[in-house]
Image (cartoon, rainbow, N blue to C red):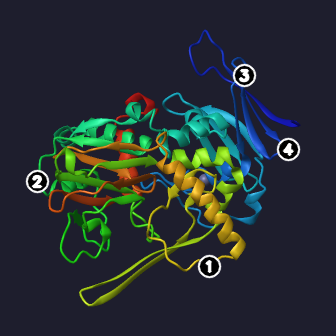
Amino acid sequence: MTSRLLKLLKFSNFAPSVSRYWTASVSNSNNAVVLQQDQSGEQLAFPAVWLRDNCLCPSCFNEAVKVRLNGKFEKSQVSTLPKSMSCSKNESNELLLEIRWPDNHESKFPLQWLRTHSFDEKRQKSWLRNNYFFGRQTWDAETFDKCIHYFRFDEILESDEMLLKWLVALNRYGLAIIKDAGTDKSRVEQLANRVGFLKYTTYGKNFIVAAKQDATHVAYTPTSLQLHTDLTYYEYQPSCNFLHFIQQPPETTGGVNQLTDGFEVSQQLKQHDARMYDVLTKTPVEWTRSWKENNKELYHLFRGPVICENVTGEVQRVNLGPTRGSQFCVSIEQANDWYKAMDYFVNLMYHPKNMVELKMEEGNMLTFVNVRIAHGRSAFTAGARTLIGGYMDWDVVNSRTRGLLKEFNIKDVNELD
Ligand SMILES: [Zn+2]
């Protein structure tokens, strides 16, 4: 790294016995500002353009609403480098890095702020883990017992700490069970209101799953349901699903839930055959459902692959189930490859090493991540099973989760396990 030393900064920012010297310099190889602590060797590096963009002064950043004010970036700022750098301390004796830019604009960055925003890869990974993935951990049939967490309905309603623990467990493992919710039909909505609000779908604010006459949906018949995720035909698919079991048939008459972690099985597929994985992440499928209700034709359609990745390659949604249209707008070769990959993937989903079966007790709630946990059920006797379901969106759920993490000042979600 070729370094142009701009100024040697000397100050003692901690105990007087320990003199701490920091050096600020510019690396010409990648237009970065590098701060180096002489004694500990701690190094913080930032793109100069990013520092300019993140200036914290009142004309660049509105502290009250936490938003930057320079909506349009000056062209000259994109490749800007500091004209000079120095160090000072603020009223609370905190170290500040001061930068004067070529246009004479001045920026001041507290050391602690720089540390919590550093470009160090390890720190960034840890931040993402705690703020975006919430310590996501996948499971299979063998590890399921360690990953399933139980909560009580009243403790979630009464305690913010328990609410947070449940939300993190839900996010982390993709599911959690809430016990003792009774048989009151408003429980799902009460739970959702504790977090934010339910997501309205074509099926209403919430839905009742029970066998009924003239059923327009297979869920409303007593037959078994294959492993699926709900509303695959929605572009804005609900992320979380809460199912409250009001009435369950006795042991012998079925109604057992099957659950598989779709993120875990996606990883297994990737390890087994990267090409098959590629086919399932890139082949668009027409997810669809159409029916007639109140004399109105409804026709949902979403085009997307079975395994949806985000831009950094993490799986963020798995589409599975019978809601697949007969339109398949790909080439014959692509279709052939897709069926081969799908055959392997679906068999993995049902494999005893991945799928768990459990029968929910009356009054309990199964809360799970709809875009991750494939769920099904065995057939049951008509009339003997009633459950109420409701959906929530990630944006609402995760905003509340992050807010609670902030309130409790929890930096590492592992603390909550
Ligand atoms: Zn500024």
Q: Label 1: how many residues lie within 10 Å, few (<14), some (14-19) or many (20+)?
A: few
The amino acid on which the numbered mark 4 sits, given as a three-letter code, is Asn
Dot 4 and dot 3 residues touching (CB under 8 Å): no
State the residue position of label 4: 28
What element does badge 4 sit on? Answer: loop
The amino acid on which the numbered mark 3 sits, given as a three-letter code, is Gly
> Between marks 1 and 2, how big is the CA–CA gap?
46 Å
Relative to 246, 90 lies left or right:
right
Dot in front, 1 or 2: 1
Residue found at x 23% / y 65%: 207
Residue 374 to residue 267: above or below: below
Counting residues from the start of the chain, the first of labels 2 and 4 encountered is: 4
Residue 41: give its label.
Answer: 3
Counting residues from the start of the chain, the first of labels 4 and 1 encountered is: 4
> Between marks 4 and 1, how big is the CA–CA gap?
50 Å
The amino acid on which the numbered mark 2 sits, given as a three-letter code, is Asp
- The answer to whether one can see residue 96 in this image is yes
Relative to 13, 395 lies left or right:
left
Dot 3 and dot 1 residues touching (CB under 8 Å): no
State the residue position of label 1: 329
